Image (tube, grey):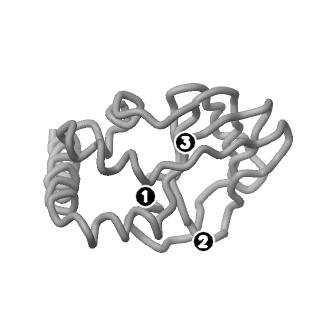
Amino acid sequence: MAASVESLAKVPLFQDLNKGTLKRLEKVVRERRFKAGETIVSQGDEGVGFFLIDAGKVEVSRDGQSLATLGPGEFFGEQALLDNYRRSATVKATEDTDTLAVMRSDFLAELRSNPDLAIDMLAVMSRRLREVEERLTH
């Protein structure tokens, strides 16, 4: 398992970033492995990172109720990169799961050292906000 520009480019938050910017972001990705039954994040905890599932499956639940099952190529926690809000759900590995993780502290350090990444991310976020507004008004 290795972080790749192609994997990161599939994440909506990153998909419009250019390849050079993705290569910089790739440097802060960490491989994280979780055993079946292991809790990855807990509802109410501080959001400290983002996880892209490389292999395995996870269950997302809120207040004990299952919301979704996610597998390879899917992700969770992307908003934790940008804010300090508490986790809105618990995510538990339902089988051995390999993830590519970006911790908020690493992401923020990269933003501080690479202003172009911050500018590119603002453009992506603005576009996504515009798309949501468009859907809500039509």
Alpha-carbon distance for marks 1 and 3?
16 Å
Task: Give the class, few, some or many, for how many residues have Cα within 10 Å of label 2's Cα (few <14, many ≥20).
Answer: some
Task: Give the class, few, some or many, for how many residues have Cα within 10 Å of label 3's Cα (few <14, many ≥20).
Answer: many
**Amino acid type assigned to the residue bearing label 3 in the image:** Leu
125 or 135: which is nearer to us? 125
Mark 1 secondary-structure assignment: helix
**Amino acid type assigned to the residue bearing label 2 in the image:** Glu
Q: How many marks?
A: 3
Label 3 vs 2, first from the N-terminus = 2
66 or 90: which is nearer to us? 90
Residue on which disc 1 sits: 79
Residue on which disc 2 sits: 46
| Direction from residue 111 to residue 72 in the image, left or right | right
Alpha-carbon distance for marks 2 and 1?
11 Å
Which quarter of the figure has residue 122?
Answer: bottom left
Name the mark on residue 61.
none
Residue at point 15%, 43% (across, down) = 134
Which quarter of the figure has residue 111?
Answer: bottom left
